[in-house]
Amino acid sequence: IDWLGEAPVPLLGHRSAVTAAHACPEFALLATGDAAGRVLLWDTNQVAYVRCLRPSGPPVAALTASPTLADVAVLGQGQGSQLTVYTANGALVGSVSSGGGGGGGDRITCAVYSSLPEGRFINCLAVGLSSGCVRLLNSWDLGDLAFIRPGLASPAPLLALAFSRDCRRLYASDRDNRVFVLEAPVDPYLSGGGGSGGGGGGGGGGMGQKTSKQQFAAFL
């Protein structure tokens, strides 16, 4: 590797193998997690340690961060799967568990945040499941917004999720080497139609929040 500029700076803080990392360029943050469940936050501008979000827990399988809130979602895999969300300041937002107990069940396998403008829309945390389904959670309190069944003849565990820039499409890949797209229909309030002339400010925010929830539910 040909390094450009200064030599790389090691980030010291983990005591076991680093198993996941996620960069959030919108807030110049990097989240890293390890096999002991420790999750650390780093400043990518200063190349410096910020704080420990979690000292220990289930092994970290994946990390993702909200590009609008800087919240960090930590996916831990043990006997079951647990998705825990922290603010960048280290406060606990909430936690969702799945697939625990001896009966197996639907495990959480991946997650991604949408990135619509805060205040005008309700962003969501899309969660991929071992059944091939997608669960949409409210990014503020992890309340359920929708449950999506792609309708494939032979569903397989999801491996990765990604939103398009306008968050109208949700891309998913599964263990059977397939990639599929879930698309919401065009909504006149989001495309600039509907509403009256220059109404813009006042009532627009409330309608945006309502429209966003309908938008994601339209994947069903």
Image (tube, rainbow, N blue to C red):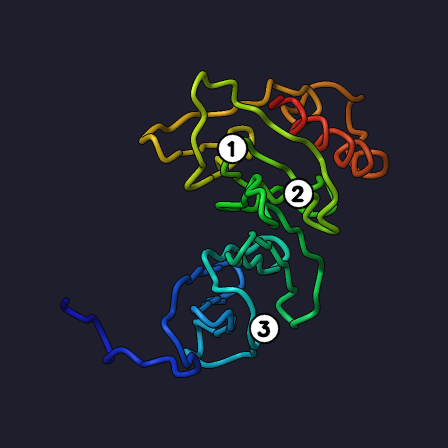
Locate the N terminus by quadrant. bottom left
Query: In terms of depth relative to the viewer, which is nearer, 115 or 112?
Result: 112
Marks 2 and 1: which is nearer the front?
1
Q: Residue 85 lies in what quarter of the image?
A: bottom right
Q: Residue 14 lies in what quarter of the image?
A: bottom left
Q: Mark 1 packing: few (<14 Cα in 10 Å), some, or many (20+)?
A: some
Query: In terms of depth relative to the viewer, which is nearer, 153 or 84?
Result: 153
Question: Which residue is drawn at the image coordinates 71% and 48% (left, top)?
Answer: 142
Q: Is residue 171 left or right of residue 101?
A: left
| Residue at mark 2 | 123
Q: Earlier in the sequence, mark 2 or mark 1?
A: 2
Locate the C terminus by quadrant. top right
Query: In terms of depth relative to the viewer, which is nearer, 85 or 189?
Result: 85
| Residue at mark 3 | 54
The CA span between labels 3 and 2 is: 24 Å
Tell me the amino acid under the disc marked 2. Asn
Q: Is residue 21 left or right of residue 202?
A: left
| Residue at mark 1 | 131
The CA span between labels 3 and 1 is: 28 Å
Kind of element beneath mark 2: loop
Q: Is residue 142 left or right of residue 199?
A: left
Q: Is residue 59 left or right of residue 174?
A: right
Give x and y (percent) for residue 69: 64, 57
> Farthest residue toward the left?
2
- Residue 206, above or below 17: above
Kind of element beneath mark 1: loop
Question: Which residue is drawn at the image coordinates 44% and 61% (left, top)?
Answer: 23
Give x and y (percent) for residue 65: 54, 56
Kind of element beneath mark 3: strand
Question: Which residue is drawn at the image coordinates 56% and 46% (left, top)?
Answer: 113
